[in-house]
Image (tube, rainbow, N blue to C red):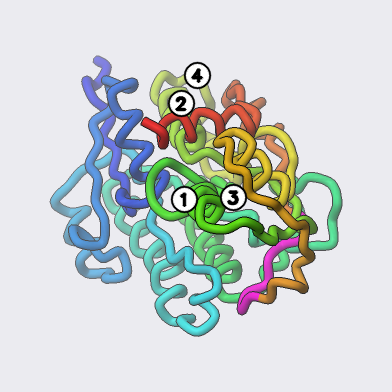
Amino acid sequence: MKKEKTNILVTGSKGQVGQELKVLAGNFPHFYFEYIDVEELDITDAAAVLSFFEKNKFDYCINCAAYTAVDKAESQKEIAHKVNAVGVKNLSEGCKMNNSKLIQLSTDYVYHNNQNTPFKEGDKTNPQGVYASTKLEGDHIALSGGGMVIRTSWVYSSFGNNFVKTMIRLGNERDELGIIFDQIGTPTYAFDLAEAILKIIQKFENKKIDKNNFSEIYHFSNEGVTSWYDFAKAIFEMENIPVKVKAIETKDYPTPAKRPPFSVLNKNKIKQTFGLEIPYWRDGLRRCLKKLNK
């Protein structure tokens, strides 16, 4: 007899992906969601996490909780490690305890190689800085506990703080902006990432995908390739903001943490395994801006 509902825990629910999962919940009526953030559960507290999983039964845990302040992480190494690695360990153990499946969100920052072709899941990692190294540690923990890791890049949304919102604000405040042109990647609309995750769960629940495909690394970003400069130009063009944009090099805008010069992700594995169609990045941006303008 088929169970009525699939129970899904979303941690870090106030973040960009967590908020988009809430938006999408109505499209997946057979899923029951519980949304928590640090106020409800501190994932770095092992005893609290185990107690929570003892009292609650979930089929899946989508971990959207992360320490993502890339530059601050350089001086707040302990906090970043606690959230990005210890927190994942606690969730992984909680999931194992009641037979839940962990889906861990990760980042393009783990690669950071002198590669100029899109990264595949098996490519060598080379994290530079605290954020990248703690996220990679979290990936290893999730996988060793039987979890799935989804690495993504350049995430933005109509929720929270992100590059799109910053560009709109600065574009309306200033006459000229300098934007980096020598970092290449792909923007990811958090709505599209959230939808892909729920479709993946749906495929497993409908037994359309072999469960052996679960504990793997997958890549997800929108389709296409761009630079931060071109991304900013697209935002200003779609929003009709008449700001002058000057192309600058990474060395002209030094930051405490190093950014990957090239972080385009190859998404063939996730598309072929789960039959996903991924939208083009400019189309995702257009939909996000439409939502923001409402």
Dot label at residue 235: none
Where's residue 69, x and y in %? 48, 68
Q: Are marks 2 and 4 in contact (CB under 8 Å)?
A: no
Per the rendered image, the range of residues in magenta is 255-262
Return the disc, 2 or 4, that comes first in the chain's sequence: 2
The residue beneath circle 4 is 208
Residue nearer the viewer, 248 or 66: 248
Q: Quadrant of residue 78?
A: bottom left
Amino acid type, residue under disc 4 in the picture: Lys
Q: Nearer the viewer, mark 2 or mark 4?
A: 2
Residue nearer the viewer, 66 or 14: 14
**Image height check: is 52 above or below 286?**
below
Q: Nearer the viewer, mark 1 or mark 3?
A: 3
Report the residue at 45% width, 73% height from top. 80
Q: Is residue 166 in view?
A: yes
Question: Which SS type dominates the magenta stretch?
Answer: loop
Dot label at residue 154: 3
Return the disc, 4 or 1, that comes first in the chain's sequence: 1
Q: Are marks 1 and 2 in contact (CB under 8 Å)?
A: no
Report the residue at 53% width, 47% height from top. 164
Amino acid type, residue under disc 1 in the picture: Gln
Instruction: Please rate how many residues cluster around mark 1, counting C-alpha atoms within 10 Å: few if below 14, some from 14 to 19, many from 20.
Output: many
- Disc 4 to disc 3, C-alpha distance: 30 Å
The residue beneath circle 2 is 199
Amino acid type, residue under disc 2 in the picture: Lys
Report the residue at 46% width, 26% height from top. 199
Instruction: Please rate how many residues cluster around mark 4, counting C-alpha atoms within 10 Å: few if below 14, some from 14 to 19, many from 20.
Output: few
